[in-house]
């Protein structure tokens, strides 16, 4: 397995606050890596830096051997990085199917000018894309809701749709920001199934930020614990959970409590 | 899509043809009433301005700088015709191109900011353009303004010469250009590019994450809208025959505000909104000309009433009434707050090709 993502000395400051501070992280192809840590540890910021939503203050991000540190989000998406945001980010004026179509944008066109001069094989490509999008909806179990407005779905289904939108461009690296938040047991199980099956059938490398430790134990072979923007420890989920430094980071020391 | 739209599909072209026929026959209907033809010509020019303003709302921004691009268009047109000696048509196109080019240059820094900051930037830029025009004596005539901008050259149609010096015939040019421009804007809104614009409007962060070049598409949008504003400025220059850019002229801040009111009263969710809003408020203003000092108040009252009772604007009246009559059926514009028509167009474009 080759190295897919190589992060070195990654830092991001918000004014005087170092949200991420000198993080090194390497991810191999086909892995599911869990990114955990207490609130405010910088987990979401790391994802934002990887997908380009935030600009990197210092350090480098190498993806598929290419330095993408200074790339804007759409160019990173172009290289195969997809993102599921923590909130249910969906195109609210579009139906379920249209959302996935929008997600498959990368397959249809490349820039403002290529859209203006639309190519002749547009219709054929559109048919292909439509078929693929419907398959994807079936995969996440939303094919019967294709014509509904995306925002009319219940929370759990919206979350699944977010994943479908992210998968529509057939990414190499999938970034999931708390995919299980606010879900009931049934929805959680279904989402875990989706993430696992994406990984096993498509070979999509996944980085997942999640607070549900049971899910992390079930999903990830490797976890990275962050605290105050720095890596605390890296290892199997069980190692990490048992580590005294991690327990201290989550619960604080005695002195903090009393 | 899911809702049956049978009769409307036929109703629309019929309505469009009827409107265009009335527009063409207007000078005959009014039997050459100069006053009303002047009002209607200015109305057409204003409709193009408001439509160009509305097209920026497709990327979820409000531009208060359309007047600034009209300034550029108007003075470019005047200079190209009077000093360079170009004829009306190429001068008009070049005026639009220059306005678009300046929008392209400004677009990158401007569109990096959002919301109220973008609006403020565009407003101040428009005012800056006006002040430049006010003081740049060599090009704009400075405080005296430019006088004697010629009307379009006479057209020789199979030996029959058509003059455009009178408002009767210039009306046709203005209305014709505006209709073509609106057709182009409408095409953009229905074309595949609006899929990207809607994506940006709905959630620009997600749009970027799925690979949309957010800033690029915003710049294309802003540039197209500035082109249209520039064209309307050129039409205005040739209509008015003289240009002035002092604080009470057409290019002042108040115009920006009025354009915004026209747009809101008409409704932003539909393409037809600016046409309805501008027409209604212009007619109201003309019919209350005897109480000129109360006009801003009347316009304001109408705007407030529309905002309270018709949040979708006058263009959304039909679907709103449908919503009242049959509450079970959600009016489309609620699901698609800005761009009620676009979703169907896109699903068609994306689906059937």
Image (spheres, rainbow, N blue to C red):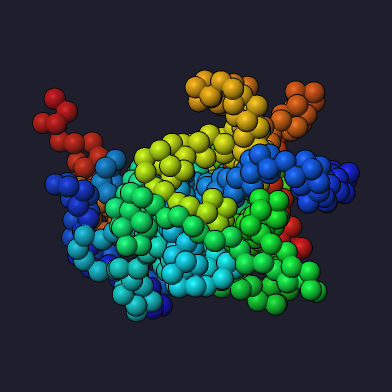
Query: At 61% across and 63% down in the image, what residue appears?
Result: B152
Left or right: B57 with respect to A50? right
From the viewer's perspective, is residue B30 above or below residue B301?
below
Query: At 44% across and 65% down in the image, what residue appears?
Result: B79
Q: Residue furthest left?
A: A255
Left or right: A134 with respect to B307? right
From the viewer's perspective, is residue B135 above or below residue B279?
below
Which quadrant holds residue A253? top left
Residue A249: percent from the left, percent from the top?
Answer: 21, 42
Q: Nearer the viewer, residue A171 or A211?
A: A171
In the picture, the quarter occupied by the C terminus of chain A is top left
Query: At 72% across and 41% down in the image, what residue appears?
Result: B33
Query: At 47% across and 66% down in the image, what residue appears?
Result: B82
Residue A39: percent from the left, percent from the top?
Answer: 29, 40
Using the rendered image of the protein, determine whether residue B304 is visible from the camera's viewpoint: no
Q: Nearer the viewer, residue B210 or B204?
A: B204
Q: Disc count in the image?
A: 0
Q: Nearer the viewer, residue A228 or B301?
A: B301
In the picture, the quarter occupied by the N terminus of chain A is bottom left
Residue B323: percent from the left, percent from the top?
Answer: 74, 27
Which quadrant holds residue B120? top left
Using the rendered image of the protein, determine whether residue B34 is visible from the camera's viewpoint: yes
Residue A214: percent from the left, percent from the top?
Answer: 42, 45
């Amino acid at each position: 397995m080759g190295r897919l993502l190589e992060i070195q000395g990654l830092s991001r400051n918000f004014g005087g606050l170092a949200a991420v501070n000198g993080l090194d992280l390497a991810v191999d192809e086909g892995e599911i890596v869990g990114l955990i840590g207490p609130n405010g540890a910088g987990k979401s910021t790391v994802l934002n830096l990887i997908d380009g939503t935030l600009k990197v203050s210092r350090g480098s991000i190498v993806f598929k051997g290419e330095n993408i540190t200074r790339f804007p989000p759409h160019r990173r998406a172009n290289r195969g990085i997809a993102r599921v945001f923590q909130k249910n980010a969906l195109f609210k004026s579009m139906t379920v199917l249209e959302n996935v179509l929008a997600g498959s944008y990368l397959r249809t066109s490349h820039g403002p000018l290529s859209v203006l001069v639309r190519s002749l094989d547009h219709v054929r490509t559109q048919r292909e894309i439509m078929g693929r999008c419907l398959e994807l909806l079936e995969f996440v179990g939303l094919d019967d809701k294709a014509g509904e407005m995306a925002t009319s779905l219940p929370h759990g289904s919206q979350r699944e749709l977010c994943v479908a939108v992210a998968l529509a461009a057939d990414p190499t690296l999938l970034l999931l920001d708390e995919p299980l938040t606010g879900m009931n047991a049934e929805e959680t199980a279904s989402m875990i199934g989706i993430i696992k099956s994406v990984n096993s059938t498509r070979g999509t490398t996944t980085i997942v930020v999640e607070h549900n430790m049971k899910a992390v134990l079930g999903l990830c072979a490797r976890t990275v614990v962050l605290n105050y923007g720095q890596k605390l420890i890296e290892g199997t989920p069980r190692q990490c959970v048992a580590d005294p430094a991690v327990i201290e980071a989550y619960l604080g020391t005695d002195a903090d409590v009393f | 899509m899911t809702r049956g739209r049978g009769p409307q599909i036929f109703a629309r072209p019929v309505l469009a043809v009827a409107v265009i026929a009335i527009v063409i026959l207007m000078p005959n209907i009014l039997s050459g009433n100069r006053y009303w033809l002047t009002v209607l010509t200015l109305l057409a020019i204003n409709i193009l301005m408001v439509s160009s303003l509305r097209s920026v709302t497709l990327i979820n921004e409000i531009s208060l700088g359309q007047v600034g691009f009209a300034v550029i268009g108007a003075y470019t047109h005047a200079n190209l015709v009077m000093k360079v000696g170009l004829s009306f048509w190429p001068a008009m196109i070049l005026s639009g191109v220059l306005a678009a080019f300046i929008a392209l240059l400004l677009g990158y820094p401007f569109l990096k900011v959002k919301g109220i900051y973008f609006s403020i930037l565009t407003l101040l830029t428009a005012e800056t353009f006006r002040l430049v025009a006010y003081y740049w004596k060599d090009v704009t005539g400075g405080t005296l303004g430019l006088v004697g901008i010629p009307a379009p050259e006479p057209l020789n149609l199979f030996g029959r010469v058509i003059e455009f010096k009178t408002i009767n015939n210039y009306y046709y040019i203005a209305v014709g250009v505006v209709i073509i421009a609106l057709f182009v804007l409408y095409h953009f809104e229905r074309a595949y590019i609006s899929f990207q614009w809607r994506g940006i409007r709905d959630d620009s962060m997600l749009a970027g994450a799925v690979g949309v070049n957010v800033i690029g598409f915003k710049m294309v949008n802003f540039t197209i809208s500035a082109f249209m504003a520039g064209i309307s400025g050129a039409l205005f220059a040739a209509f008015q025959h003289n240009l002035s850019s002092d604080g009470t002229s057409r290019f002042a801040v108040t115009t920006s505000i009025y354009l915004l009111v026209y747009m809101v009263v008409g409704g932003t969710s539909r393409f037809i909104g600016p046409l309805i809003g501008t027409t209604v408020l212009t007619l109201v203003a003309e019919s209350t000309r005897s109480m000129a000092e109360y006009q801003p108040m009347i316009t304001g009252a109408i705007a407030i009433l529309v905002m309270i009772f018709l949040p979708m604007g006058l263009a959304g009246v039909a679907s709103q009434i449908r919503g009242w009559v049959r509450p079970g059926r959600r009016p489309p514009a609620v699901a698609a707050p800005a761009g009620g028509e676009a979703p169907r167009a896109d699903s068609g474009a994306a689906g059937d090709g």
